[in-house]
Amino acid sequence: MIPVFPTTYFGSIEYYKALAKYSEVIIEAKEHYPKQTYRNRCDIVGANGILSLSIPTERPNGSKTPTDEIRIPATENWRARHWRSIQNAYSSAPYFDYYGMEIKALILDEEISLLTYNTRITERIIKWLDLDTTLSTTEEFATVIENDPRDLLARKNTSNTTWQAPYIQVFHNSSLYKSSLSILDAVLCDGPMARNLLIKRKS
């Protein structure tokens, strides 16, 4: 059975760790879009600690709007703010010069469908980390199962927090490491080696 994942904006390290287990993943497109999840936000680390970046969304049919009909409004300049926040947080990271312009292009993409916007980002990250995973989207709502990834991987502020990060972070002395941090943190600090955070090595 092919697992069904939620859409996500620069998903967390835990999200990509789960994604990397499968050769094929289906992204849920038909669920009634829930608020306050990582479907439209991500967490990065700045000088003052954890910073949450959130995409404004419009739900044409209110609470019954499916994910593939969620729109990104053109009225707010959030893209520039997000890029500026990432630039401020990671300009000194070892791999910022390598990935920075691609990240900027992804953020400044003027796509108005949240699902399409997020999927383009996810596919690019899969390429960066050389993951053997392909994505498709649901054509109808998939039945929720026990320990469903759509719930576990998209909840906000439910991740583990530890003192020791598995890689050297830009602000490693100023905040605790959280597994909910965006994969951007690992990619910009650890480059291609971030793949090792996701793939379980064979003994």
Image (cartoon, rainbow, N blue to C red):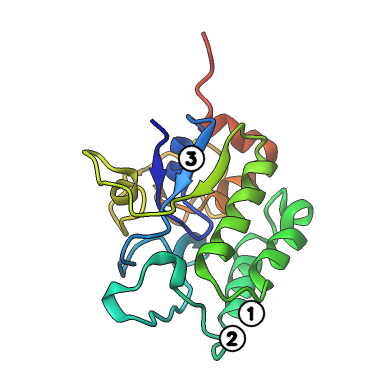
Callout 2–callout 1 Cβ contact below 8 Å: yes
Q: Is residue 89 left or right of residue 175?
A: right
For numbered disc 3, what is the local secondary structure? strand
Q: Nearer the viewer, residue 56 or 64?
A: 64
Q: Amino acid at mark 1?
A: Ala
Q: Nearer the viewer, residue 52 or 139?
A: 139
Mark closest to the chain's N terminus, 2 or 3:
3
The residue to which callout 3 is attached is: 25
As drawn, the label of residue 77 is 2
Q: Amino acid at mark 3?
A: Val
Between the C-alphas of marks 3 and 1, the distance is 31 Å
Query: Which residue is located at x 78 percent, y 51 percent?
Result: 98
Query: Which residue is located at x 64 percent, y 68 percent?
Result: 107
Query: Residue 111: x percent and y percent?
Result: 62, 73
Q: Is residue 21 left or right of residue 65?
A: right
Q: Is residue 196 above or below residue 106?
A: above
Query: Looking at the rendering, which quadrant does residue 30 occupy?
Result: bottom left
The residue to which callout 1 is attached is: 80
Query: Residue 41: x percent and y percent?
Result: 44, 65
Q: Is residue 36 left or right of residue 20?
A: left
In this view, the residue farthest toward the bottom is: 75
